[in-house]
Amino acid sequence: MKLSKVYGIHSVQSALDYSPKKINKAWIDSQRQDKRLTQLVEDLLDLGIEPEKTDRKKLDRFADSNNHQGIVIEVEMPEELSESHLKDAVLTVSGTPLFLVLDNVQDPHNFGACLRTADATGVHGVIITKDNATGITPTVCKVASGAAETVPVYQVTNLARTLRWLKEQGVWVMGAAGEATQTAYQTDFTVPLALVVGAEGKGLRRLTKEQCDMLVKLPMLGKVESLNLSVATGVLLYEAVRQRSLVG
């Protein structure tokens, strides 16, 4: 079980909204009183959790001196799954497989946004790298708005090897790359698919790119050269939804 401290009005409210059963403990500033904090305390009491009143210094320590707004909770975080779990999922998936692969993505806000879109588009799981990448953190959970609880996240040590294995199982590996010659709208998303997106600013690593069966890009009609990672991922996943709805 992975426990983490979550702090701040909005983050605590998000935990109450999307994973109330995962909250174990709570602490509040004994000197602070306002409507928003009072409401959170009432919600916690409804769950049978009585917040411990404490001093600001202790809360500062829990929040690593970040702005906690007078409240900190301890939450059981979703855990990343292993490569063996991924293999089981691929072999038993219901329907046409659709996986999202994030190659060394380090920004928790982008990761959380990708999880949220993955949930909305019916992705069967998100594959992340173990090294040089963010895992599931309180920030990721906050941005994901509940999707960290619903979308399986598989952490792998060797992404190139994992992609090779996926191809052996009949899953096509599609990489998003600005230098691609074909656009997403010229590509078949109805096949069993693993969509691979690279890190912000860096793109796909060479070994990752070499494992891709195809590379695709989004048409850029304006002056900017690229889209935000999570925005581009959302466009590509919804293209998969669009195409699959036409043949389903």
Image: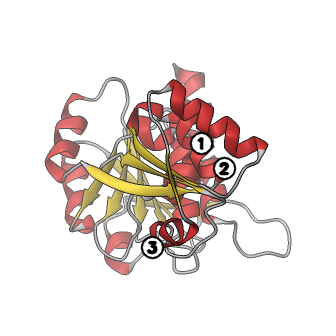
Q: Residue at x 47, y 72 (%)?
A: 61
- The answer to which image quadrant residue 128 occupies is bottom left
* Type of amino acid under label 3: Leu
The residue under label 2 is 10
Label 1 vs 3, first from the N-terminus: 1
- The answer to which image quadrant residue 120 occupies is top right
Q: Residue at x 45, y 73 (%)?
A: 204
Q: Are marks 1 and 2 in contact (CB under 8 Å)?
A: yes
* Type of amino acid under label 2: His
- The answer to which image quadrant residue 238 occupies is top right
The residue under label 3 is 204
The residue under label 1 is 14
Label 2: element kind: helix
Task: Name the mark on residue 24.
Answer: none
Q: Which sits in the foreground, 208 or 69?
A: 69
As measured in the structure, the alpha-carbon distance from the residue carrying label 1 to the one carrying label 2 is 6 Å
How many numbered marks appear? Answer: 3
Q: Is residue 77 above or below residue 182?
A: above
Residue 81 placement (x, y as % from top left) = 24, 48
Residue 228 placement (x, y as % from top left) = 67, 66
Q: Residue at x 59, y 42 (%)?
A: 14
Label 1: element kind: helix
Label 1 environment density (alpha carbons within 10 Å; few <14, some 14–19, many ≥20): some
Q: Residue at x 73, y 76 (%)?
A: 225
Q: Looking at the image, which residue sits at the far right?
A: 222
